[in-house]
Image (tube, coloured by chain):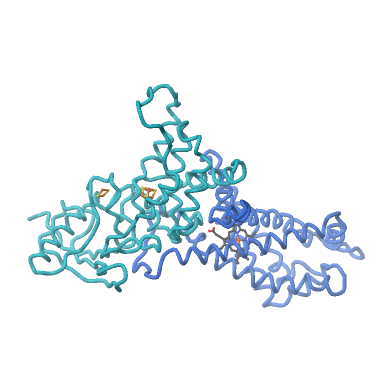
Chain colours: A cyan, B blue
Amino acid sequence: MSNSIKLTLNIWRQANRHAKGRFETYQPKDLSTDMSILEMLDSLNDEMIAAGKEPITFEHDCREGICGTCGIMINGMAHGPDRGTTTCQLYLRRFKDGDTLVLEPWRAKAFPVIKDLLVDRSAFDRIQMAGGYISVNVGNAPEANSILIPKDVALEAFDAAVCIGCGACVAACKNASAMLFVSAKVGHLSLMPQGHPERHDRALNMIAQMDAEGFGSCTNTLECSAACPKEISPKWIQRLNGEYIQAATVTRR
Amino acid sequence: MSWLTRTFTSSVGKKFLAGLTGLGMFLFLIAHVSGNMTLFMKTKVGQDPAFNAYAKKLHDLPGFALAEALILLAFAAHVVLVIWLSYTNRLARGEQRYAEVRSKQDPQNQLALFASKTTLLGGVIILVFLVVHMADFRMARFMDGNLITQAKVVTALQVPWRAFLYAIASLLVGWHLFHGIQSGFRSLGMRHPRYMTYIQKFGVIAAVLIGALFASMPIAIFVGFITK
Ligand code: HEM
Ligand code: SF4
Ligand code: FES
C-alpha cells in the first residue's frame, strides 16, 4: 500500500479520575495516511480489543469539526499542529513515516481526566448555565424580521458564535484560562439586540462561574486563539474585559 | 461581599487593576526617564549641574509627596495583584503538567510570546533591583533631607556592580513593558482592532525607548561620559 504510514504513539493512559496516569507506547499496524487521528485510535483499539487489552478511551462525536468533543493534545499542541483544525479533521498524511506522536488529554484543574484521553468539560456547561443564554417566552415564534440587525453586526456576532466549546483554548493557555471561550459566549450574545436585556448579568455571572471553576486568568499570551479550531480572535477577550468593568460599574444591582 | 470587593477580587477585576497600576507606573517612568536625561547636559565650569536644578524644581512641585505616595501605592498593588494572579494561574493547570508543550502561534509572534512568559521573572528581578535603588537614592533624602545631586549619582554608579545592575534592570523594565503596555491596554478592555495595532506598535517603541534611555545613564557614567 503506497499510502501506508508507520507511527509510534506515546499515549496517556489513566484508569480513572484518581488513578495515577502514565504514558504507554504503541506501534499500530496497518495505518494509512488517509486516516484521521480518531480513525487511527479506532484501528489501534480494534487491535487491542482483539488482543484482549483495555482500549484507549477518547471522546468523539461528529467527526467533522462541529461538536467540539474530540480535543487531544498532540505533540504539545491542542488539536495538533494545524491551525483552524479539530483533532477529528487532522489526517495522518500531515505526519512523516516513522514520526512519534505524543497524545495527552487536556490538562486543567477544571477539566479533570475521566479516563485516558477523556476529560470532564462540564465546567463549560456550568459557565453556560450561569448566563450563556437569552430568556424568551415559550409559545409562538416571533416574526423573524421584527428586530432588525445590521448585516455587519450579525456577521461579527457569528465570528464568536462559531465557538464549539472544545476547550482547546484552556488546554493551550499557560494559565489554563477559559477567557477565550467565555468571551466568545458573552461576545456574540451581547452584540445582538436579543442579548441586550441580560447583558450585564451575563458578563458578571459567567465570569464569577469561570473563577469558581478554577480556571486561570488571561495574561494576553494569545496562545488560545492560535489553538482555537474556530480561530476566535483574542479581541473578544478585550471586549469581555470592557464588558465586565462596564457591567460592574453601571449595573443596577 | 460588596460590589467593590466582588469586582476587584474576580480574575478580570484583578487584571483590570494590574493593568491600570502597570500603565500608571509606565507614565511615571516616562516622567522619570525624561527628567533624568538632564544628567546628559554639559555643566559649565562654576555652575550647578542641570540635574540638580531639575531635582530641586521637581521636589518643590505642589503635590509631590502625594504623587510619590500614589506611585508607591500603585506599585504595591501591582505586585500583590500579579503575584496573586500568577499563583492561581499556576494552580489552574492542575498537578499533572504536560509532557510536551509547543506553540501554535506564528513565528513573528514568538518574541512577544517569550516576553509574556517571562513577565513574572522579569518583574521579580525589577522588585529586587528597586530595593537597591531605593536604598541608594531614596533613603538618603529620608535620613538627612538632602536632595540627590549629580555628584552623588555619578559616585554611586561609578561602582562597577551597581552600573551593571542598573543597566540590566533598565533593560528588564523595557522587556517587561514590551509585553506589559499592550497587555495592560487589553486588560483595560481596549478592544477595537482598528486601534489595537497602533497600541501594539506604540507599546514596542515605548518599551524599547524606556529600556534604552534608562540603561544609557549607568553606562554613560561608567564609561566616564557623564561626570560630576
Ligand atoms: C517599574 C515597575 C513596573 C511597571 C511599569 C510594570 C508595568 C506592567 C504593566 C503595564 C503590565 C500589564 C498589566 C496587564 O497585563 O494587565 C504588567 C504586568 C505584570 N507585571 Fe508589572 N510592572 C512593574 C513592576 C512589576 C514587578 C515588581 C513585578 C513582580 C513582582 C511585576 C510583575 C508583573 C506580572 C506578573 C504581570 C502580568 C503579566 C501578564 O499579564 O502577562 N511587575 N506590568
Ligand atoms: S474559543 Fe475556540 S478553542 Fe475555545 S472552546 Fe471555543 S472553539 Fe474551542
Ligand atoms: S468529533 Fe466533533 S469536532 Fe471533532
**In the displayed structure image, the side of residue B45 where residue A25 appears, left or right:** left
Residue B17 in the image, given as x and y percentages of width and height: 62, 55
At a point 15% along the width and 57% down the height, the residue shown is A42
Between B3 and A174, the one lying in front of the other is B3
**In the displayed structure image, the side of residue A87 where residue A131 appears, left or right:** right
Q: Quadrant of the N terminus of chain B?
A: bottom right
Residue A203 in the image, given as x and y percentages of width and height: 50, 45
Between B136 and A179, the one lying in front of the other is A179
Visible residue check, residue A61: yes
Residue A166 in the image, given as x and y percentages of width and height: 33, 51
Image position of A165 with respect to B134: above or below: above
At a point 44% along the width and 49% down the height, the residue shown is A180
Image position of A62 with respect to B70: above or below: above
Residue A45 in the image, given as x and y percentages of width and height: 14, 62
Residue B9 sits in which quadrant?
bottom right
**In the displayed structure image, the side of residue A81 where residue A217 appears, left or right:** right
Visible residue check, residue B206: no
At a point 24% along the width and 49% down the height, the residue shown is A89
Q: Residue furthest right?
A: B46
